[in-house]
């Protein structure tokens, strides 16, 4: 398992019940120090992880939802702005490739500034969005402070025509 996937899973595990670095290390088959570094990276990404004497907790876990979306390259910035402006954080992007299966990449976009920095990288022409290999269909894991905020993001994506029909 790659570090990005492990960190995503750690973030989804942490809640109000404490988990020690040792227990997480055993679960993921890595050293305790790797978990400590993972937690530091998650904190740098904006996760509110607290170390207690009984283990790591996330006292205010964020709600998460996966949205299946479709739009053109020119609409990418608008999609990211829409989610960030509504209080969401685009945690990742992934596609389902018919040969390779799930291909994913972390994003960590929670503001217009983050979106602009991401777009600058794309506009450099070195790479293209993952969505381009699946006819513009792709998925985002989006987190927000509440299910209500995720509902609002879903409505906004649908109103704009970005929300794709389910599988």
Image (cartoon, rainbow, N blue to C red):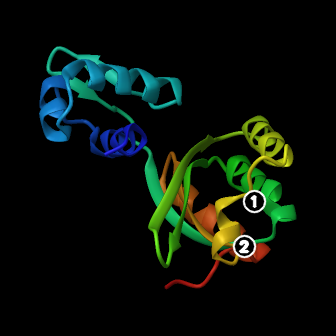
Q: Secondary structure at mark 2?
A: loop
Callout 2 crowding tier (Cα within 10 Å): few <14, some 14–19, many ≥20: many
Left or right, 29 with reference to 123: left
Q: Secondary structure at mark 1?
A: helix
Q: Determine the residue positioned at 75% across, 59% down.
A: 79
Residue 150: mark: none
Q: Determine the residue positioned at 45% across, 25% down.
A: 41
Q: Determine the residue positioned at 14% across, 20% down.
A: 54
Left or right, 35 with reference to 163: left
Left or right, 85 with reference to 50: right
**In the rendered view, would you say 10 is above or below 18?**
below
Task: State which quadrant residue 11 falls in.
Answer: top left
Residue 79: mark: 1
Left or right, 52 with reference to 40: left
Task: State which quadrant residue 33 falls in.
Answer: top left
Furthest-top residue in this view: 53
Q: Are marks 2 and 1 in contact (CB under 8 Å)?
A: yes
Callout 1 crowding tier (Cα within 10 Å): few <14, some 14–19, many ≥20: many
Query: Residue 39: where, in percent of width, then height?
Result: 36, 25
Which residue is disc 2 drawn over? Answer: 162
**In the rendered view, would you say 157 is above or below 150?**
below
Tell me the CA gap for discs 2 and 1.
Answer: 8 Å
Q: Is residue 18 visible?
A: no
Mark found first going from the N terminus, 2 or 1: 1
Q: How many marks?
A: 2
Q: Determine the residue positioned at 64% across, 47% down.
A: 87
Query: Residue 82: where, in percent of width, then height?
Result: 75, 56
**In the rendered view, would you say 150 is above or below 97?**
above
Q: Nearer the viewer, residue 128 or 77?
A: 128
Query: Residue 126: where, in percent of width, then height?
Result: 78, 46
């Amino acid at each position: 398992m790659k570090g990005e996937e492990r960190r995503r899973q750690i973030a989804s595990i942490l809640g109000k019940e404490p988990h020690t670095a040792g227990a997480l290390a055993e679960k993921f088959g890595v050293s305790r120090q790797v978990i400590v570094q993972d937690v530091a990276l998650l904190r740098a990404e904006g996760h509110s992880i607290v170390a207690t004497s009984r283990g790591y907790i996330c006292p205010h876990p964020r709600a998460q939802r996966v949205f299946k979306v479709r739009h053109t390259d020119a609409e990418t910035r608008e999609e990211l702005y829409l989610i960030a402006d509504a209080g969401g954080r685009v945690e990742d992007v992934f596609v389902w490739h018919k040969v390779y299966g799930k291909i994913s990449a972390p994003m960590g976009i929670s503001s217009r500034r983050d979106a602009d920095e991401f777009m600058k990288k794309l506009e450099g022409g070195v790479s293209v969005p993952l969505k381009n290999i699946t006819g513009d269909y792709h998925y985002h894991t989006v987190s927000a402070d509440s299910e209500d905020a995720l509902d609002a993001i879903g409505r906004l994506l649908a109103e704009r025509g970005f929300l794709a029909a389910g599988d």
